[in-house]
């Protein structure tokens, strides 16, 4: 009986992911190196997939390491990707390397962001983001997305908040479409409530939306770079990304340099 339940569950889960990824049975079968007939049997519960084919199907669907582990568990197999704490011995070299990257990005702000916007690490230059923010938003663990968009966080200081905030929300919604997650859906709904609806104007640049941030030293124009750890085999590391901010003009670069020098002295 339990074997039948497992076959039904893995079949339903594969169909769900195919729908999310908009991939046909034939396309997925070709990507995974199997036949459409075999995949059809798996999805209908007529065949129990082996561990190897589950791993290939998960990879072909572009699932995250956590999602791959979940798919294996649904099929009745043990997860294959470990999930470590950043402070554990196995990841200490990675943690040290991340801290070097953060320090090396000075005098520009950089953060290591975990799931749901949680700040895992940051360099000293991020104090430009916390300037004037409510203490409630700065209590650990800090949620960077909430700090950026909350009316008691950075929002009042972002001169182009409607456009830039919508850019952030659109990126988060794209993430939820790719990897549906009720918890992330709830968070995005909360964050979207902070951003005013703003009609797209003729000068809208889509993804190219520098943030214009007011500070005690003057306005900063910042662009963002995102780096993920695509070859990671640990769930924890794979779910982190580096968010590094760069000056969009020479005036911003000079202001950040002055702020960093003042902080050191």
Image (spheres, rainbow, N blue to C red):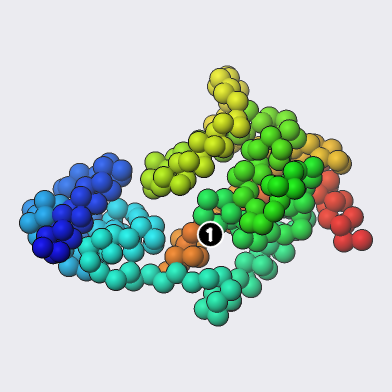
| Image quarter of the N terminus | bottom left
The single residue placed furthest to the front in the displayed view is: 1
Q: Which residue lies at the image location 56% right of the left edge and 20% below the top edge?
A: 199
Q: Residue 232: x and y, percent?
A: 46, 67
Tell me: residue 12, above or below residue 48. above
Q: Residues within 10 Å of mark 1 (few under 14, many from 20)?
A: many
Q: Quadrant of residue 48?
A: bottom left
Which residue has dot 1 on it?
240
User: Would you identify the image quadrant in which residue 50 lies?
Assistant: bottom left
- Give the residue at x 92% y 61%: 265
Describe the element under mark 1 as helix, strand or loop: loop
Left or right: residue 157 compared with residue 8: right
Q: Position of residue 122 (x, y in %)?
A: 68, 59
Residue at the spot 18% in from the left edge and 60% down from the top edge? 6
Q: How many marks?
A: 1
The answer to whether residue 205 is above or below residue 238 is above
Q: Nearer the viewer, residue 177 or 103?
A: 177
- Residue, x 41% and y 45% (percent of image)? 182
């Amino acid at each position: 009986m339990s074997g039948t339940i497992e076959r039904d569950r893995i079949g339903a889960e594969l169909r769900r992911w195919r729908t999310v990824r908009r991939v046909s049975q034939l396309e997925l079968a070709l990507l995974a190196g199997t036949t459409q007939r075999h995949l059809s049997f798996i999805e209908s519960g007529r065949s129990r997939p082996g561990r190897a084919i589950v791993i290939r199907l998960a990879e072909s669907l572009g699932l995250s390491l956590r999602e791959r582990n979940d798919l294996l568990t649904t099929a009745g197999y043990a997860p294959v990707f470990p999930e470590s704490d950043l402070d554990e011995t196995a990841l200490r070299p990675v943690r040290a390397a991340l801290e070097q990257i953060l320090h090396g990005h000075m005098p520009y702000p950089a953060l290591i962001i975990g799931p749901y916007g949680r700040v895992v690490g940051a360099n000293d230059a991020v104090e430009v983001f916390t300037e004037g923010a409510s203490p409630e938003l700065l209590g650990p663990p800090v949620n960077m997305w909430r700090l950026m968009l909350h009316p008691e966080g950075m929002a009042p200081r972002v001169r182009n908040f409607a456009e830039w905030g919508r850019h952030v929300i659109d990126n988060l919604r794209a993430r939820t479409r790719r990897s549906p997650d009720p918890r992330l859906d709830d968070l995005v709904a909360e964050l979207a409530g902070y951003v005013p609806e703003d009609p797209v104007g003729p000068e809208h640049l889509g993804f190219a939306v520098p943030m214009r941030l007011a500070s005690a030293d003057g306005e900063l124009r910042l662009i963002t770079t995102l780096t993920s750890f695509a070859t990671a085999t640990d769930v924890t590391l794979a779910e982190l990304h580096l968010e590094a901010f760069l000056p969009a003009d020479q005036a911003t670069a000079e202001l950040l340099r002055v702020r960093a020098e003042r902080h050191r002295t």
